[in-house]
Amino acid sequence: MITSISGTLASATPLSAVIETGGIGYEVHIPLTTTERLPRLGQQVKLQTFVVYREDAHTLYGFSTEEERDFFRLLVEKVSGIGPKLALSVLSKLSLPVLKGAIAAGDVALLAKCPGIGKKTAERLVIELRDKLGGGAVAGKSADSVASLAATGADGKIRDAVLALIALGYKPTDADQAVRQALAAMGPTATTEALIKRALG
């Protein structure tokens, strides 16, 4: 199993990157939330990876953090009806803290707003993943590290701010991105109200 890849970022599109290492260029499929964190072309980058083996292809998926990779793996392996492409789409539309928060809170309506995820699939997400995110170990990690959203106040603030923007008419993707940008600018100590104000401004 290829668990990570490091090398030079040769090219990038919103949903893929080519990383050159050892004279070979590897195409890695990535969510938009990872694309946002990529360095400039020609610089060094490291992605946490997961490989999906099929008869006709071996596809490499990459993520900024181990938590994102492990969540992607859970989606693909544990939730019926969700394959790699749909899992990547879900992680492109909502950041990991918001996704985990929605699952922990049973927020089917928010999950169902992801493209390709209807109400029934959203309900399956909650039923099949809530216990895995909230208890036990996943991929060798403790519940605290895997279910970071449910356990930490910072992630709770992110979800609350996103939900507030959605209530004001923002699309879930736009709300999530605006809050992430606000958090990056203000730091983890920012309050929910401050995040909302910055995102709106």
Image (tube, rainbow, N blue to C red):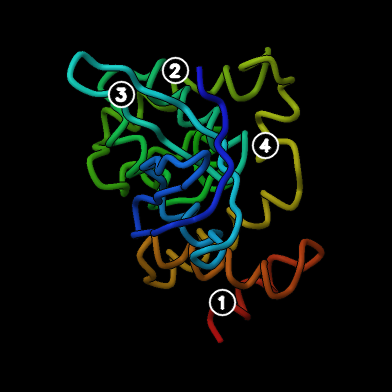
- Looking at the rendered structure, the secondary structure element under dot 3 is strand
**Mark closer to the chain start, 1 or 3:** 3
Q: Which residue type carries mark 4? A: Ala
When asked about the image quadrant of residue 117, the answer is top left
Which label number is shown at residue 73?
Answer: none
- How far apart marks 2 and 1 lie (CA) works out to 33 Å
- Residue 17 at x, y = what percent? 40, 51
Query: Which quarter shows the C terminus?
Result: bottom right
**Cβ atoms under marks 2 and 3 closer than 8 Å:** no
- Residue 133 at x, y = what percent? 60, 24
Which label number is shown at residue 58?
Answer: 3
Q: Is residue 100 left or right of residue 193?
A: left
In the picture of the structure, the residue carrying the numbered disc 2 is 128
**Mark closer to the chain start, 2 or 3:** 3
- Residue 91 at x, y = what percent? 42, 44
Q: Which residue type carries mark 3? A: His
- Residue 50 at x, y = what percent? 47, 27
Q: Eyeballing the image, is 187 above or below 149?
A: below
- How far apart marks 2 and 3 lie (CA) works out to 27 Å
